Structures are given as structure tokens and as C-alpha cells.
Image (tube, rainbow, N blue to C red):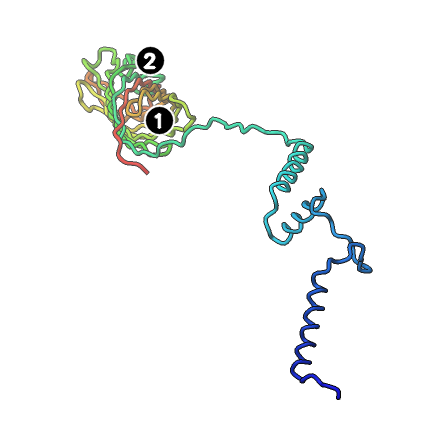
Amino acid sequence: MRLRPPPGALLAAVLAAGALLSSTAAAAPPDGDARVEGALPSAAPDAPGAATNRDADQAADGEPASPAVDTALGAQGDEAAAAEPLPPVRRRVQLATRPPPLHVEYAQYGVALAAEISLDAGAACPRSGPLYSCILGSGGGLAIRGGYRSPGPWYFGGAYQFTKMDSSNLYRLGIFQQLRAEMRYMPDIGYRAAPYFSAGIGGVIYGNEWGAETGGALIFGGVGVELEVSRRAVLGVSCVYRPVLLAGWKDTANYERATAIAQFVGFELLLEVRTELGRR
């Protein structure tokens, strides 16, 4: 009589045999000589180029490279910089420039010592006859002036001048008085001493002891030099040519003097001060 094992015991024996076979296959070491056909040998961890290649791959993938790679790349950059010649260095040359002028408005006024040199008295002093003695010669006196100095090169003002003239003793004190409107053009040349051009018109009177026995009109034009002692004081000299038209008159000796065009050269030594009005 043959005995059959129960079905549950047979199933348990099959599962136990399968488990034993799988554990034995996992524990067995792989064959060192086994090679997969077509596979490439991997680089050894300690190979010289392995770390560099791995770090380069990491840098390409956006990962930080190792310090060794940074040192190698820095050394290569230094060698490249040392091999290239440096461009020549050009020094900057800064030219000395004048500061811009101050745009200041001034009231300018002062006094001047004046001299009137007679070039020709015209018909007022004929060269022959009883009127040969010249009643209108040269002289000297004082001028007082004031005006407006613009921020630019222009000056506009007025002046009053009186001069004691040589009258050949026909007048006890012959006074030649002028009231003038003046202008100056003063180009900026960057120095304390600056030249200027002047011109103007005005009126005159002439007589004995501040009297007005005759009168007329004048024009003038000339040049001068102005020295800036400080921002508020200037010294200057000027020379002008001044023709004067005088109406005919009767002098104190009862001689009739004809209408004349007298010509003078005027010189002035002036001192003027400035008062600041405002800035632009």
C-alpha cells in the first residue's frame, strides 16, 4: 500500500527549495573575468584624468567644481595673461583751464584826474588879427563818473568833468564843463589788466568862473587799460579823441568869437570801485 503526502506538506517543501536556491545565487561572487560584450572599461577612481573629467562634467552640468580644478584653471589663466603683452598705458594730461567768469552785475563809480590837450581851437582862436590870443587852450581838472557794469564785457554810465583851461588871461578862471554819456567794451582776456574801448556823446559849456558864455556838443572815442586791484576796486588810464562843437559868443573883452570846432585829446587816470548788485 503506497502512502501519499498531504497536499499542504508538498507545497511547503517546494517553497522552501525555491528560497534556498535564490539565496545561494545571490551570495555567489560575480566572476571577475566575466565581460559583457561591447562594454567599455570604466576609469579607475584614482586615475589622474578621472577627477578632472568628472569635475568638468559637473561644471558643465552646473555643479561646483573641485578646488583642484579651480587651481588648474586659474594657473592656465595666469599663463595666458602673462603671455599676452599689456597695452601701453597713456597718462591723462589735464590742461589747466581758467574757471568760468563770475556772472555778477555791478554799480561802478569813481573819480579821475583829467587832462585836456588842445590840438586845434578852430575859429575860436584865429591865427591872426586882434583875436590871435587863444581863449581856449589846454587844461586839467577832475572827472566824476558812475554807471552799470553788466555780467558781460559792457559798461554804460555817465560822467561830469570840469577843467580849468588856459585862456591867455582873457578869463580870470576859464572853466570848461562836460556832461557825457559813456560806454565801454571790455573783452575778457583772463588777466587782471584788461584793455577796453570807449565812446560817447555829451554837451559842454564854457565861461569865466563857472559861467556859461558858450556851449555846444561833443563826441569821443578812445582806448584804455583797466587794472583790477580787487573784485571791488580798479585802476585805469585812458586816452580819447574829443572833437567839440562850440557856438559863437562874445567874450569878456567884447570880441566876437565865431562858431568853432575845437579838437582835444583827453587823458585820464581813474580810480573806481564796484558795488555788487546781483548774480546770474
Label 1, residues with CA under 10 Å away: few <14, some 14-19, many ≥20: some
Quick one: label 1 or label 2, which is nearer the N terminus? 2
Q: Give how far across and how far down residue 171 sits, in percent.
A: 20, 14
- Closer to us: mark 1 or mark 2? 1
Q: In the depicted view, which residue is nearer to us: 154 or 125?
A: 154
Q: CA distance from mark 1 to mark 2?
A: 29 Å
Residue 139, relative to residue 146: is it above or below?
A: above
Write down the quadrant of residue 157 in the picture: top left
Write down the quadrant of residue 217 in the picture: top left
Q: Which type of secondary structure does the marked residue at label 1 adopt? A: strand
> Which residue ends up furthest to the bottom in the rendered image?
1
In the image, taking residue 260 as reference, residue 21 lies left or right, namely right
Question: Mark 2 belongs to which amino acid?
Answer: Ser
Residue lying at 35% horizontally and 22% vertically, measured from the top left: 226
Q: Give how far across and how far down residue 6 sits, in percent.
A: 67, 84
Residue 12, relative to residue 124: is it above or below?
A: below
> Which residue ends up furthest to the top in the rendered image?
169
**Is residue 8 at all visible to an observer of this figure?**
yes
Q: In the depicted view, which residue is nearer to us: 249 or 267?
A: 267
Question: Mark 1 belongs to which amino acid?
Answer: Phe
Q: Give how far across and how far down residue 280 sits, in percent.
A: 33, 38
Q: In the depicted view, which residue is nearer to us: 94 or 253?
A: 94
Residue lying at 65% horizontally and 40% vertically, measured from the top left: 73
Write down the quadrant of residue 1 in the picture: bottom right
Question: What is the total number of numbered labels drawn onto the structure image?
Answer: 2
Q: Which residue is mark 2?
A: 128
In the image, taking residue 46 as reference, residue 129 lies left or right, namely left
Q: Which residue is mark 1?
A: 220
Query: Marks 2 and 1: in contact by CB < 8 Å?
Result: no
Residue 30, label in figure: none
